[in-house]
Amino acid sequence: MFIHRTRNILDLSRFSEEARVLNNKIISVIKFGDDDLRFELLSAFDLQEELDLDGLILNFIDADPELKIPMILDLAKSEARAKHFHNIDYKVEIVGGLVPKRTVTKGEVTRVDWYRAIDTSQVPIDKVLTVDITYFRDPSGFATYRVTNRTWINRDGSLNPEIKITPKYYYLNPADMIVEGLKRRKLLVNSIQIPVLTFMMETMLPLGHSQPEIIMMGRSFMDDYEPDFSRFIENSSSVNDPQDVNFGRKSIIVELEENAIDGRNKDYNEWLDKKPASIGGAISIRDYLRSEFDI
């Protein structure tokens, strides 16, 4: 018999299986009292076998249960701390507020990481909560429903297993499907502007263009295409002539393609056709825009 003083083993059944795999001298493992594990052995352990077992135990113990408490409870306003952490309004009931970092994919906010603060180097610190959002759409692109998974971060940086899953069913209220589409397209137009400007800087500065000059190129492009962007946002404008070779395609994509030929883009083709190294060097800025608007 071998007795090991330890703290609480989180999963005694799985630990027993892995312990027997680790060392075939172990016949069984029994929890004894509050702090002890009792091992029934075929023969005594040598020193190395005891060290190996110590290493396995470290993977299964909860060294300090206090560290498994969600960090948000430490940051919540006093009146909110009595709530289950799922029910704390993390946009309102946090002392000093949280800092969101959003991931946007083709106009969809697919992830939001919420942080306690930003350090002096403008780097987010102490992630408190991760919100993952998955959209489900019909063949026409309308959102039918979405699923939001919220995962809280514990004091020790581990993920709390109590994930909150929240569905939203757009199809139950068709007007919500239209509103979601409007928001998505508007966010898409807003969210591509900084990446495109960054691509322009990357490819045009080496050619001798100044930063103010490049910014004005971008603003001129936005001015010229403002009606196209507006129609895209308001009604997802598409080519609706069945006889047109581009039937069903987004009008703004066709404009970007055809105006490379007919002259409307004469002032923009230089940078639209550049291929930034930051996106692989094989894709032009025009290709990037075409891909983003293809929703």
Image: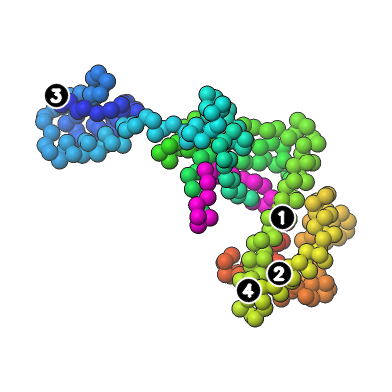
Q: Quadrant of residue 13?
A: top left
The N terminus: image quadrant: top left
The label number, if any, that marks residue 215 in the structure image: 2
Q: Amino acid at mark 2?
A: Ile
Q: Amino acid at mark 4?
A: Thr
Q: Amino acid at mark 1?
A: Asn
The label number, if any, that marks residue 203 in the structure image: 4
- 234 vs 287, left or right, is right
Q: Residue at x 53, y 50 (%)?
A: 118
Query: Could you tell which of marks 4 and 1 lies nearer the N-terminus?
Result: 1
Query: Could you tell which of marks 2 and 3 lies nearer the N-terminus?
Result: 3
The label number, if any, that marks residue 1 in the structure image: 3
The reply to whether residue 261 is in sight is no
Q: Closer to the camera: disc 4 or disc 2?
A: 2
- Per the image, label 4 sits on a secondary structure element best described as helix
Q: Closer to the camera: disc 3 or disc 4?
A: 4
Query: Could you tell which of marks 3 and 4 lies nearer the N-terminus?
Result: 3
Task: Report the number of discs.
Answer: 4
Q: Within 10 angstroms of label 1, few (less than 14), some, or many (20 or more) residues?
A: few
Q: CA distance from mark 1 to mark 2?
A: 16 Å
Q: Amino acid at mark 3?
A: Met
Give the vertical position of 16 relative to 96 (above or below).
Answer: above
The label number, if any, that marks residue 280 in the structure image: none
Q: Is residue 110 magenta?
A: yes
Percent position of residue 26, x then y: 19, 29
The reply to whether residue 191 is in sight is yes
Q: Residue at x 74, y 71 (%)?
A: 217
> What residue range appears in magenta?
105-122
Residue under pointer 1: 190
Q: CA distance from mark 1 to mark 3?
A: 68 Å
